[in-house]
Image: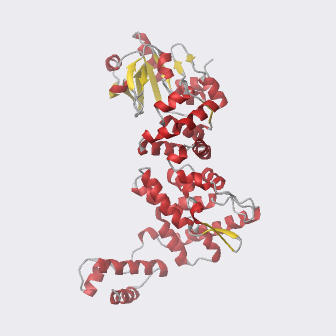
Amino acid sequence: MVPITLLKLVENNSFLSTLSSLYHGNGFELYLVGGAVRDGILDIPTNDFDFTTNATPEESIELLKKNNYKTTEVGKAFGTIELYDQERVVHITTFRKDTYETDSRNPEIEKASDLVTDLSRRDFTINSIAYSLEANELIDPFSGLKDLASGTISTPDDPIISFSDDPLRMLRVCRFASTHGFSPDNETYIAMKENIERIKIITKERIRDEINKLLVGKSPSMGIRTLVESGLSLYIIPEINELKIEVDPKHHHKDVYEHTLAVLDGVPPKLTLRMGALLHDIAKPNTKGIENGKVHFRHHEVVGARMTKKILKGLKYDNKTIEDIALLVEQHLRPHTFKMGWTDSAVRRYIVDAGHMLEDLNELVRADVTTKNKIKAKEIYENLDEMEKRIEEVKAKEELSKIRPALSGDEIMEHFNIQPGPKVGVIMKALYEQRINDGEVSKEDALKLAEETYKNL
């Protein structure tokens, strides 16, 4: 029986039935496959529609063009064409089978003669279910429906062969743990452990993309646990494993690894914020010390920001993303100093330093409160509430993103009769600091500071 959720998906996307009728009316088979079937059964909204067919790409293009569809042959080597239906992009791929070389995850493609052979090449059983719209029938040769029902990840082929052929599939196991809450079965899990070194043949960019999808899932901690427990993290972000530093009951410090996962689940599903949560305490193992019988992790936020930049650079993140995440790591302890009292100057400084990451930083700081002591937690949250209230009050007084020194660069050059260069920059920086610290500043006061700064150059 076809689940009503999948039937509703088809009903809400009538072009799917139109395509099916077109192919079958011209003597071809056409099946909806992959994520659309999986998520349709799980009642998860999707706009990702993939079909497989016994028609060749040339036959598909000819048929679709005759019926006024716009198409592009995007993956000739893979037998795939793209069909454009209004704002949707639909992929139609000819039945195929894949053969892999040892040093590459890019398969040699051959046309397959039947649907089951095509389904057998796919990554997981939950993605190896086909739906015939014409017959209103699910084709499930590898028990994908059973795995969907139990929340299990397994492979249609021998998992050792499957992961050796395409090691990126191991990262997809971790991703599905996060996005769907699924867990690998024992055979799949063992195969991951036996193949972890194969991840070395995957480009950093492809690894990064899978990590991104994992982090913005509904349960990122499950994805990270699978990544760590399988051993894959040792080849991607080994520093995460090091968070499992021994919990010393004598000196009473929290389990850094478990705390990190709790913070990760506690922030909204935004990539920079989730990565900031994952890495916010990454330097604690390197900075752990004991003083007067108490554990400390002195300057772990500063060391952590440096480690964060190195980790993310290695995974080929762009510079802006790296800087944004490093800022979250470096600043995540700062709001806790608010309990000691902040002047307007200190609030302005915090807002300016956080910049466009202010909201994310405050989200991270709140999620970082994982103490089980309810009285302590209440005190911290009240302190953060007061801090955010002060931030809004200061922001209401002036638009801090447009703060400028009381004197312009041209005025500085004219007054001191100097040309553009480093001296002007040093003076302007001093005036900018004055503006943040003192608020509105007169030109006279700004000029006094400029002259003092110029004398010391």
Judge left or right: residue 394 versus residue 248: left
Among the 4 quarters of the image, the one containing residue 182: top right
Q: Position of residue 180 (x, y in %)?
A: 60, 37
In this rendering, would 373 be left or right of 369? right
Quadrant occupied by the N terminus: top right
Q: Is residue 309 left or right of residue 218?
A: left
Q: Position of residue 251 (x, y in %)?
A: 72, 66
Q: Residue at x 62, y 38 (%)?
A: 181
- In the rendered image, the quadrant that contains the C terminus is bottom left
- Provide residue 285's location: percent of width, then percent of height: 59, 60
Residue 164 seen from this side? yes
* Up/down of 352 relative to 457, above or below: above
Q: As drawn, is 274 to the left or to the right of 427?
A: right
Foreground of the two, 260 or 22: 260
Q: Is residue 123 visible?
A: no
Front-lying residue, 342 or 68? 342
Q: Is residue 246 above or below residue 103?
A: below
